[in-house]
Image (cartoon, helix red, strand yellow):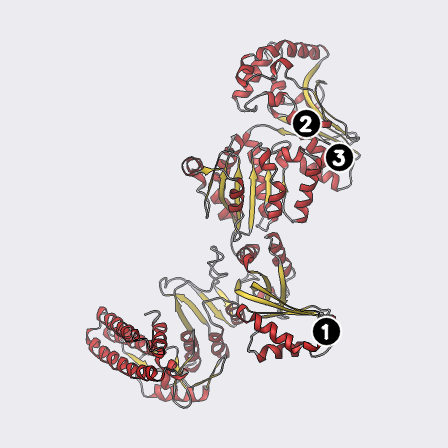
């Protein structure tokens, strides 16, 4: 019988406004209750209840007639009328029990429960109420009693209510009066949640809470338990159970004196629509009574403070209040401190609207180092700016004020940081070529395992290529990504695509660039500034304009975002990470030399006597090792780009134009179509066979080698190398890199492994995505 109380209060408002429709709505409400009775198997009780309803509605009609005539409705009249719904509901339940063979009594709580109301709370007269309860029980024999919630009476026997959420409060009050062993509150959810499920879909039920934890969560907005409910139970140490009427077998949440769950943080609560009022001035330093005057000013205008934060310098105090009270609070404070403001001892009283409070709660936080650090690290990584902070000495609650627009992202990031839910990443993939397809298929094969075993929830919310894009709010069904891209895509708009991936309620946004496009790399700086983390296999940004490259790294640092590009050199090999470690630990590069093209490594590893160069190149293209136009590989530009990336990682200011490159494509084959080039491949054979024979005569082999020297000189050349050289022992698509440094001089550091092929490149990108999730707070 939901919303009956609201309907009854509406009747009083309509009658006061002399709106005739109150009679129609009153008749509808009577019919609703009669229909309820008639639909239940309570034939023996139905006639009695119907008579009660008609009598009660007749009484209400008389009261409302007086409201109509006087055009006024006192608070006591509203309290009286609004309480009828609970009486009818309890009477119907008692009748159902009696008809089911259960001997159940009915108790109108107004006969027992005596209270006095203040503007903000309800005070129970425990002595009087307990005596009345004892007297009533002494005259009853029923094993079960149905008691009305929500309603009570004053000492003058005037009907009143416990205000909103009063039914749960009633349960706790009667539990206290009856010295109950347990109190059960049956609701429509499984228990107290670790966060608001509307903000955190992965929020979980907290099985075990202390009174203090539940009170903190309730105060800061958790809807299941009202703070008032806790008081009567705490006095007698009565456990409160929160259970689901529609899932009765579920364990639910137990609230008791002590919490026995192992997690230090139980949950997060939020209050939205807040304002932050800040008073600041040098004249406050060391002056006693400033805080007292501040709170007096707020009390005079009946403004309640949700949170307070004061700098240790005493130069500023800020308070969080409900947004509807912000303006009046500011005005009252300015009035109180008018003299100090006129003397410039207080420089400003500022008001910041559209704020929210996030509160982290848990008894286990006490004496546990790092709780605050982890919280604020999570918020920082999620691009959430903290406006104010408060923590009590009990260490049970850490609260922060953030912009309202950031609250979704804030609570999701904080919730996952303490492993209460999965680490959620909003991911967009750019490029569906060979590497892109392979990456998406690899991700699909591990998608469920990552979520279930690692707590990493990768929401693939967008895929695009050079022409089309597809997006989905909760995530594309990754196993069907190709079919979805084909059937549900729209023309590519890169700005709209990135904006969608960067939705505010996801804590972390990631773009993965698997294209070779200049258009995407031109957006890198902007995307980092917008808060994206970037993973790329695209070499254009790392080897492009030097000034732009430096700005890219600077923006990534300043915006606290991750720019990850390991696969731009060596595919899945740990090349750049190893070089980074060498430099960071104080070593100095003397020379870097290597075979950096998996395609050309395969070709020259396979190029032996009696085998034509053209046949090997054609075979490499058929296996997918080359670019669609093999001249991209033979030109040496790809190796040159990798050298530039390596040099810059080593701290050298190398530009692509400064690299000496030996192009293996004859000038007469450079400006023709790909098809014609493939038809004329044999024109390469004579020159290449001569070079091979020359090398073999000197007991050497051919290798396409990139080289960087400490003075910044760089070259990409086809070289003859000794058969004892590490480069001569390569096979397949292997890349190899030799780092000669001051520490690794006599015997250089060597990194070798497959450096071409979609599988290893995609796997390298996948590994970077998993590393990123760990950096952002996912469990390792």
In the rendered image, which quarter is residue 384 located in? Answer: bottom right
Q: Which residue is mark 3?
A: 652
Is residue 574 something that shows in the picture? no
Residue neighbourhood size for the residue with mark 3, other residues' Cα within 10 Å, grouped as few (<14), some (14–19), many (≥20): some
Is residue 337 something that shows in the picture? yes
Could you tell me if the residues under marks 3 and 1 are in contact, i.e. CB atoms within 8 Å?
no
In the rendered image, which quarter is residue 322 located in? Answer: bottom right
| Left or right placement of residue 128 versus residue 57 in this view | right
Residue neighbourhood size for the residue with mark 1, other residues' Cα within 10 Å, grouped as few (<14), some (14–19), many (≥20): many
Q: Secondary structure at mark 2?
A: helix
Mark 2 or mark 1, whichever is nearer to me: 1
Q: Is tag 3's residue or tag 1's residue first in the polypeptide sequence?
A: 1
The residue closer to the viewer here, 770 or 527, is 527
| Left or right placement of residue 658 versus residue 349 in this view | right
Q: Is tag 2's residue or tag 3's residue first in the polypeptide sequence?
A: 2
| Left or right placement of residue 699 versus residue 353 in this view | right
Q: Label 2, label 3: how many angstroms apart (C-alpha)?
A: 14 Å
Q: Secondary structure at mark 3?
A: loop
Q: Which mark is residue 640?
A: 2
Q: Secondary structure at mark 1?
A: helix
Q: Which residue is mark 1?
A: 284
Report the label total.
3
Residue appearing at x 60%, y 20% in the figure: 631
Mark 3 or mark 1, whichever is nearer to me: 1
Q: Residue furthest bottom?
A: 156
Residue 388, position in %: x, y?
Answer: 63, 64
Residue 644, relative to residue 130: is it above or below? above
Residue 753, position in %: x, y?
Answer: 63, 29
Q: Label 2, label 1: how many angstroms apart (C-alpha)?
A: 63 Å
Residue appearing at x 77%, y 27% in the figure: 713
Q: Label 3, label 1: how many angstroms apart (C-alpha)?
A: 53 Å
């Amino acid at each position: 019988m939901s919303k009956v109380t609201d309907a009854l209060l509406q009747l009083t408002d309509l009658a006061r406004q002399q709106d005739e429709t109150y009679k129609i709505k009153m008749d509808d409400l009577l019919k609703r209750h009669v229909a309820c009775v008639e639909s239940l198997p309570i034939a023996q009780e139905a006639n009695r209840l119907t008579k009660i309803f008609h009598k009660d509605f007749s009484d209400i009609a008389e009261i409302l007639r007086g409201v109509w005539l006087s055009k006024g409705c006192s608070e006591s009249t509203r309290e009286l009328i609004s309480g009828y719904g609970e009486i009818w509901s309890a009477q119907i339940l008692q009748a159902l029990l009696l008809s089911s063979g259960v001997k159940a009594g009915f108790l109108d709580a107004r006969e027992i429960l005596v209270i006095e109301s203040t503007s903000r709370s309800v005070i129970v007269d425990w002595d009087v109420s307990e005596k009345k309860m004892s007297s009533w029980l002494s005259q009853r024999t029923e094993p079960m009693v149905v008691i009305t919630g929500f309603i009570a009476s004053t000492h003058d026997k005037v009907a009143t209510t416990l205000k909103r959420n009063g039914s749960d409060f009633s349960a706790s009050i009667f539990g206290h009066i009856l010295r109950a062993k347990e109190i059960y509150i049956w609701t429509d959810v499984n228990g107290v949640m670790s966060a608001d499920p509307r903000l955190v879909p992965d929020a979980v039920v907290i099985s075990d809470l202390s009174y203090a934890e539940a009170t903190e969560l309730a105060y800061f907005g958790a809807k299941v338990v009202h703070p008032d409910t806790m008081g009567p139970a705490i006095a007698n140490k009565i456990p409160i159970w929160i259970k689901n009427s529609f899932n009765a077998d579920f364990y639910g949440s137990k609230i008791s004196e002590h919490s026995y769950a192992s997690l230090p943080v139980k949950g997060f609560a939020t209050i939205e629509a807040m304002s932050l009022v800040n008073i600041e001035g040098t004249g406050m330093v060391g002056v006693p009574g400033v805080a007292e005057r501040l709170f007096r000013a707020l009390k005079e205008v009946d403004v309640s403070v949700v949170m307070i934060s004061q700098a240790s310098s005493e130069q500023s105090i800020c308070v969080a209040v409900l947004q509807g009270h912000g303006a009046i609070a500011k005005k009252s404070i300015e009035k109180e401190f008018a003299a100090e403001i006129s003397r410039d001892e207080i420089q400003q009283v500022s008001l910041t609207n559209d704020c929210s409070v996030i509160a982290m709660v848990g008894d286990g936080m006490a004496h546990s180092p790092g709780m605050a650090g982890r919280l604020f690290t999570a918020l920082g990584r999620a691009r959430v700016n903290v406006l104010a902070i408060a923590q009590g000495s009990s260490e049970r609650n850490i609260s922060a004020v953030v912009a309202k627009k950031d609250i979704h992202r804030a609570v999701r990031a904080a919730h996952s940081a303490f492993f209460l839910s999965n680490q959620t990443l909003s991911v967009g993939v750019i490029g569906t070529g060979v590497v892109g397809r392979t990456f998406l298929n690899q991700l699909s094969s591990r998608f469920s395992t990552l979520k279930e075993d690692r707590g990493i929830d990768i929401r693939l919310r967008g895929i695009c290529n050079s022409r089309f894009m597809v997006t989905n709010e909760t995530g594309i069904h990754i196993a069907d990504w190709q079919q979805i891209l084909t059937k549900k895509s729209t023309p590519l708009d890169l700005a709209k695509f990135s904006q969608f991936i960067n939705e505010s309620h996801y804590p972390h946004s990631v773009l993965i660039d698997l294209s070779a496009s200049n258009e995407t790399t031109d957006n890198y700086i902007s995307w980092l500034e917008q808060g994206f983390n970037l993973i790329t296999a695209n070499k254009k940004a790392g080897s492009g304009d030097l000034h732009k490259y430096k700005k890219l790294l600077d923006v990534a640092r300043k915006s606290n975002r991750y720019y990850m590009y390991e696969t731009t050199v060596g595919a899945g090999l740990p090349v750049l990470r190893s070089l980074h470690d060498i430099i960071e630990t104080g070593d100095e590069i003397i020379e870097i030399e290597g075979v950096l093209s998996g395609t050309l490594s395969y070709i020259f590893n396979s190029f032996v006597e009696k085998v034509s160069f053209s046949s090997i190149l054609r075979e490499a293209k058929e296996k997918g090792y080359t670019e669609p136009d093999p001249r991209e590989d033979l030109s040496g530009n790809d190796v040159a780009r990798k050298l530039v990336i390596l040099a810059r990682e080593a701290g050298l200011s190398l530009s692509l134009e400064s690299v000496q490159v030996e192009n293996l494509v004859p000038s007469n084959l450079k400006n023709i179509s790909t098809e014609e080039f493939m038809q004329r491949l044999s024109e390469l054979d004579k020159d290449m066979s001569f070079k091979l024979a020359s090398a073999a005569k000197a007991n050497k082999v051919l290798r396409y080698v990139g080289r960087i020297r400490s003075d910044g000189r760089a070259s990409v050349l086809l070289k003859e190398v000794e058969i004892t050289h590490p480069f001569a022992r390569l096979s397949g698509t292997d890349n190899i890199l030799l780092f000669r440094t001051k520490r690794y001089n006599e015997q250089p550091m060597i990194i070798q492994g497959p450096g071409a092929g979609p599988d290893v490149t995609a796997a390298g990108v996948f590994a970077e995505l998993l590393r990123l999730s760990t950096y952002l707070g996912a469990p390792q």
